[in-house]
């Protein structure tokens, strides 16, 4: 969260790359509750996708972050600029520029309820704002 928060605070909270790439996410409390849920339901075993049932696009993520941190403007970062920046910090841009779309199908079927199913609800809790 902190890297995105810093981008937004310094006016760079626009879309990253095309902005259409999917972004799966989860609130830390939801992740903790999933662990407890699986522990408390002994019949559950195997692999579970731990993400909310509502993946969003990078554009939606950045819009929500700007809204949560009261920033109206965010300069976009084109792919070429992200790739250039990645060279300097010795990392890859794959996690930012490629889609990651994960759905918690098994958790949904088992009846798990996410306290923070939407990015706006999660960000409101993180920033201590009630929507």
Image: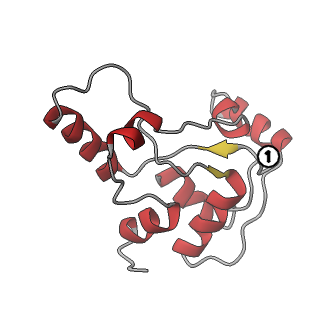
Does the rendering let one see residue 9?
A: no
Q: Mark 1 points at which residue?
A: 17
The C terminus sits in image quarter: bottom left
- Mark 1 burial class by Cα count in 10 Å: few <14, some 14-19, many 20+: many
In this rendered view, identify the residue nearer to me: 114 or 111.
Answer: 111
Q: Is residue 103 left or right of residue 22?
A: left
User: Where in the figure is residue 43, as x and y percent of width and height?
Assistant: 20, 25
Numbered marks: total: 1
User: Where in the figure is residue 10, as x and y percent of width and height?
Assistant: 62, 65
Does the rendering let one see residue 64?
A: yes
In this rendered view, identify the residue nearer to me: 93 or 46.
Answer: 46
**Where is 54 relative to 89, above or below?**
below
**Where is 80 relative to 115, above or below?**
above
Q: Name the residue: 81% across, 43% down.
A: 81
Instruction: Indicate the colouring scheme.
Output: secondary structure
In this rendered view, identify the residue nearer to me: 52 or 59.
Answer: 52
Q: Name the residue: 55% across, 59% down.
A: 6
In this rendered view, identify the residue nearer to me: 20 or 96.
Answer: 20
Q: In which quarter of the image is residue 13?
A: bottom right
Q: In which quarter of the image is residue 101?
A: top right
Q: Is residue 95 left or right of residue 116?
A: right
Q: Name the residue: 50% across, 46% down.
A: 25
Q: Quadrant of residue 92?
A: top right
Q: Name the residue: 55% across, 43% down.
A: 24
User: Where in the figure is residue 68, as x and y percent of width and height?
Assistant: 52, 72
User: Where in the figure is residue 35, as x and y percent of width and height?
Assistant: 24, 37
**Where is 91 relative to 33, above or below?**
above
In terms of secondary structure, where does tag 1 sit?
A: loop
Q: Is residue 117 left or right of residue 16?
A: left
Residue farthest top in this picture? 46
């Amino acid at each position: 969260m902190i890297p995105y928060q810093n981008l937004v605070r310094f006016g760079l909270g626009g879309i990253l790359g095309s902005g259409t790439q999917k972004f799966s996410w989860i609130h830390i409390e939801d992740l903790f509750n999933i662990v407890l849920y699986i522990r408390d339901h002994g019949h559950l075993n195997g692999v579970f996708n731990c993400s909310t049932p509502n993946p969003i696009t990078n554009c939606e993520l950045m819009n929500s972050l700007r809204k949560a941190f009261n920033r109206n403007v965010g300069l976009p970062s084109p792919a070429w600029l992200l790739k250039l920046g990645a060279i300097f910090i010795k990392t890859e841009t794959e996690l930012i520029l490629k889609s990651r779309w994960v759905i918690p199908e098994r958790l949904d079927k088992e009846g798990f309820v996410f306290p923070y199913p939407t990015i706006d609800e999660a960000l409101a809790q993180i920033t201590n704002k009630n929507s």
